[in-house]
Amino acid sequence: GVRNALAMSLFMTQDYHACLALLQSSEAAIASIPQMQYIYAESLVKAGQTAPGGERLEALAAAHPEIAEVHRGLAEVHEKRGERPQALQQLHMAIQLNANDPKTYFDLGKVELADGNGAAAVSALEVAVRLAPDQAEYHHELAGAYLSAFRMADAEKERQIYKKLSSQP
């Protein structure tokens, strides 16, 4: 109902602490709603409560392995723990479930870049930019990946796109 809609709105505006406060008071009511369980778990992670958020995401992934966002959330937990192979595995699972989510490709590119896999990072970030060309942050990350692959002209082109997009109101 209204409480869930408000929680979703708070989540979308990245007010994770307010979202948590609202959902904690109605935890029993959201127990049967996977989307709200995901929002609760992801809000915990985003609010810095990685361990309990990760536990909830793992339980949700076991009960609902078909939800791509849950795997992306688990990837973030693994990355925060320094568990890059597990993070990569979760991101690839998320892509298998939803091959059109630019955020998953963006996250994959960042993990690959942090892991020293420049070519894989470039590939993932190029897909993210193709799927969401208006996201300045994606162009910025792709510019960095191109730099790591010594593709200076491509890096400069992406940097210019980033500057143009980030200067827009």
Image (cartoon, helix red, strand yellow):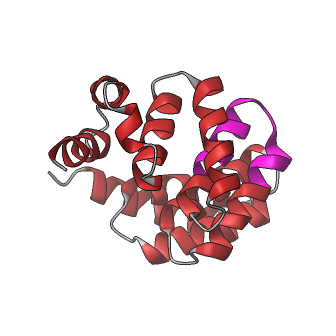
Q: Nearer the viewer, residue 47 or 121?
A: 47
Q: Nearer the viewer, residue 113 or 49?
A: 49
For image coordinates 19% across by 55% down, the residue present is 168
For image coordinates 72% across by 56% down, the residue present is 90
Q: Is residue 75 magenta?
A: yes
Horizontal side of 51 relative to 24 (left or right) equals: right
For image coordinates 29% across by 51% down, the residue present is 166
Give the magenta-colored segment's residue range: 72-88
Q: Is residue 87 magenta?
A: yes
What secondary structure characterizes most of the magenta part?
Answer: helix
Q: Position of residue 73 (x, y in %)?
A: 58, 47
Residue 155 is at least partly visible in this image: no
Q: Position of residue 38 (x, y in %)?
A: 48, 47
Q: Position of residue 83 (x, y in %)?
A: 81, 38
Q: Position of residue 101 (x, y in %)?
A: 50, 70
Residue 43 is at least partly visible in this image: yes
Horizontal side of 161 relative to 99 (left or right) equals: left
For image coordinates 70% across by 53% down, the residue present is 62
> Relative to 54, does residue 94 appear above or below in the rendering?
below
